[in-house]
Amino acid sequence: MASLQSFSKPVSQNPHITRKPVDHSLSLSLIPRNLAFLGPGLRFIHHGSAKEMKIIRSSKRTEAVTDYSIQVSDVPLLTCSEAMERLKTNRENQKGTQEFLAMYSSIFGGITTDPSAMVIPIDDHMVHRGHGVFDTAAIRDGYLYELDQHIDRILRSASMAKIGLPFDRESIRKILIQTVSASKCKTGSLRYWLSAGPGDFQLSPSACNQPALYAIVVQDKSPFSSKGVKVVTSSIPIKPPQFAVMKSVNYLPNVLSKMEAEEKGTFAAIWLDGDGFIAEGPNMNVAFVTKDKELLMPQFDKILSGCTAKRVLALAEGLVKEGKLQGVRVENVTVEEGKKADEMMLIGSGILVRPIVQWDEQIIGDGKEGPLTQILLNLIIKDMESGPLTVRTPIPY
């Protein structure tokens, strides 16, 4: 068997890897079923050999093209410590805008601040069957924003998904706060999951002995932007209402919708519901300011009930009292109404309030960031920084 050291060497120096001339006519656009991936889009095993995979992106699709120039004589059998060391090396080599500062897992019953240990069992029903729900709360200046509102929502989602609770609500709340405290993160986000738990690879969760809770604290280094964006109408079918109203981990339609928007050079794609009314974005709500200066938002009966969107609605009532808005309405919104609005915005815990300046070929308003959209953004930011304790939970660092 090839030694571990030989596999850590560059291809050109590794005696266990031979190179053959590349025949580009062998490039594949379809991946055979009998393969196992060794890395994220890099190599896979097929009939005892390893091949290098290249990912080619175009404006319309992504194709996997195989390079048959590399063959590996063997795959190492790793001990637990060796596997953990490789996990650590892999994590250290990953570069991105996000840092993972702390993770809680009910499986190992504690919190870790080592990103290489932030893993989930592969037999967890959430991993191989999508039987899990999640939610996210923002961390701002040492406070969790709308933590209780987000906990209430994940508990509703878990009930709809028939997922039991590993702990009672108050215990879950304390665990989430302690995880943020251990991370020492002052500004970032807390994401957490409830799953049916590990057990086996069957479709039924009957062998999953205990539901699981996972939580992770993420610090994003990307600069915040309130610049106006363009959106398109999504061609990806929206989830049926039964699944759209719960925040489950089944986000493939959302991912494909976001990818569709990016392929068209826009920020997000807007879903329409089964009756043709405006629904939501891939992971955010949508709202409008009409020509009569009313804040208009689609109903939540067929889409996810956005915590940030509901907070915007509450804060907007103050603008009505000040005379800056003439009213606030939550009702069915047609595409025609939306595209004729003076202002259009996306609302979510990650983006807060983001102005939209163009939808498909239609310029929204004067094509600039709307003034009331900016006012609503400022209200949310102020609420996060100095709002009442009903929406701000202090973290004991």
Image (spheres, rainbow, N blue to C red):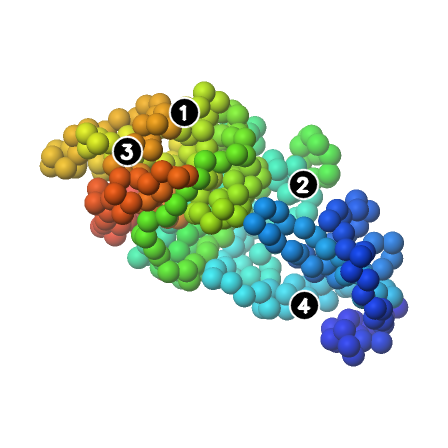
Disc 2 to disc 1: CB gap under 8 Å: no
Query: Quadrant where the C terminus lies?
Result: bottom left
* Residue 144 rendering spot, x and y as whole percentages: 35, 49
Q: In this orientation, does residue 357 appear?
A: yes
Disc 3 to disc 4: CB gap under 8 Å: no
Mark found first going from the N terminus, 2 or 3: 2
Q: Name the residue under label 3.
A: 341
Which is closer to the viewer, label 2 or label 4? 2
Q: Mark 2 points at which residue?
A: 128
| Residue furthest bottom in the image | 13
Left or right for 278, reference 385: right
At 76% from the left edge and 52% from the top edge, which residue is drawn?
Answer: 28
At 39% from the left edge and 56% from the top edge, which residue is drawn?
Answer: 188
Disc 1 to disc 3, C-alpha distance: 15 Å
Tell me if mark 2 has few (under 14), some (14-19) or many (20+) residues whose alpha carbon lies within 10 angstroms of its own. Answer: some
At 80% from the left edge and 76% from the top edge, which residue is drawn?
Answer: 14
* Residue 139 rendering spot, x and y as whole percentages: 36, 52
- Mark 4 belongs to which amino acid? Glu
Disc 2 to disc 4: CB gap under 8 Å: no
Q: Toward the viewer: 231 or 52?
A: 231
Mark found first going from the N terminus, 3 or 4: 4
Disc 2 to disc 4, C-alpha distance: 25 Å
| Image height of 101 relative to 360, above or below | below
Disc 2 to disc 3, C-alpha distance: 43 Å
